[in-house]
Amino acid sequence: MERDDLIKDNEYALSASHSEEEGAAIRSTVVKVTIILSLLTIVEVCMGVWLSDRGAFTWQMVKWGFIVMTAVKAGLIVMEFMHLGHEKKALKWLVLAPYIGFILYLAFICLIEATYIFTVGGGN
Amino acid sequence: MSGDKTEISSKEAWGGGVSPVKTSYGKQMMWFFLVSDALTFGALLTALGFMKHKFEDIWPLCEDVFYHFPGTHAHLPLMYVALMTFILIVSSVTMVLAVEAGHRLDKSGVIKWLAATVVGGLIFLGSQAWEWDTFIRGNEAQSTAFVLPSDNENVAHVRFADDHHVFNESGEGNPVELAIEAINSGEATLELANRTTLSNSDAIKFLKNNAEQVQGANMKKNEYGLPLYANFFFCITGFHGFHVFSGVLFNLIILVQVMKGTYDKRGHFEMIEKTGLYWHFIDLVWVFVFTFFYLI
């Protein structure tokens, strides 16, 4: 395969070009995403510091809250900052589908197994 | 694949056909590399999750480990890590702005935002160096952690009834004897890794059984708890830090190329997009490290 990144006036690279007005719209999206990411981080730290000694059930819920907020942050970074949400559907799913599938399976199988080892006392 | 830097015509690319995902070769390959790199980080974090579940009762809490902030002695749990997260998010934002400027062929805008991204990356690396230094030296001049040579997983802590009491402030004397003295006088108790407190007689038996003070952290033992905890800290934040380091390097190289006018000649700034993808990926990984190592 030839290196098409060295093509002068490459049509794929040029198709990403935009005007001053479109640029302004993109910049305002960037500001919004930044504010959401920062707020979520602040909320996470506050929950971690103040809700860690409120009993096992609360902590379990807080942990699920962390996972949901992390998923939202990751989604915003991948879809907006990395622009994947605006790419062709084919590229989007070529990246997301294998990754999400493998990692969810790996996490599921490892965590179930580790919890079992803990319950039968293999930890100590 | 022609390795030389001669320009080719679009008739030769993709055998004269159309790119299946309507992106250039370089950008597509960057995405595939990031997927494989993300699987590596995913495996590391899953391994961490495995050990956290396996040692659920004795895994150290990060709020009790990372509470220092440069320039102050106040107890600020996780604040410094949160600041590092914020620094990385901001440097990701400046990178988006560099890519956006590139799409308008605004060369001076690209230089400005790319330089800001490099500076953000360097600040993050410096912060990480400070955090490693604090972690390795230990949280206080004299640690309150004691461990038996036969069992370095069960780290016991001397806990003083008075929260502000500093253990062995002068740094003189035998720490084990001082700990026994404090427990005998009722000033302190000994807490095991699983957060149970020993009775005074058991505590003294533990300390007299050749217990030694643990200061800071290395790969074999640490004052925070399980050796695995420090191992995962070094491995995950180290691997991520190495990615940040190489990201800064890539950004610097591209910055020099922009200044030299390489991309003006090429007619587009797609290279900024490609290093940008790598840089955002570093931010993305840190978001997961922050949650799964530090918070949960």
Image (cartoon, coloured by chain):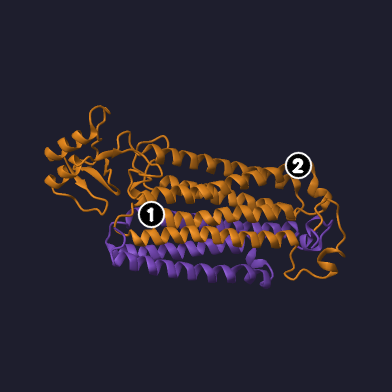
- Give percent across and percent down for residue B144: 27, 40
Numbered disc in front, either 2 or 1: 2
Residue shown at the point (40%, 47%) measured from the top left = B230
Few, some or many residues within 10 Å of mark 1 (<14, 14–19, 20+)? some
Q: In this view, does B191 lie above or below B165?
A: below
Residue under label 1, please give it.
A46
Q: In this view, does A124 lie above or below B149?
A: below
Residue type at mark 1: give it: Cys
In-image side of B3 versus A96 (left or right): right
Q: The orange chain is which one?
A: B
Is residue B192 visible to the viewer in this orientation of the structure?
Answer: yes
Protein chain holding label 1: A
- Give percent across and percent down for residue B159: 22, 43
Badge 2 and badge 1 both on one subunit: no
- Give percent across and percent down for residue A55: 27, 61
In the figure, the shade used to draw chain A is purple
Is residue B69 visible to the viewer in this orientation of the structure?
Answer: no
Residue under label 2, please give it.
B259
Protein chain holding label 2: B
Q: Closer to the camera, B19 or B33?
A: B33
Q: Could you tell me how far apart the alpha carbons at marks 2 and 1 are, in whole angstroms? A: 43 Å
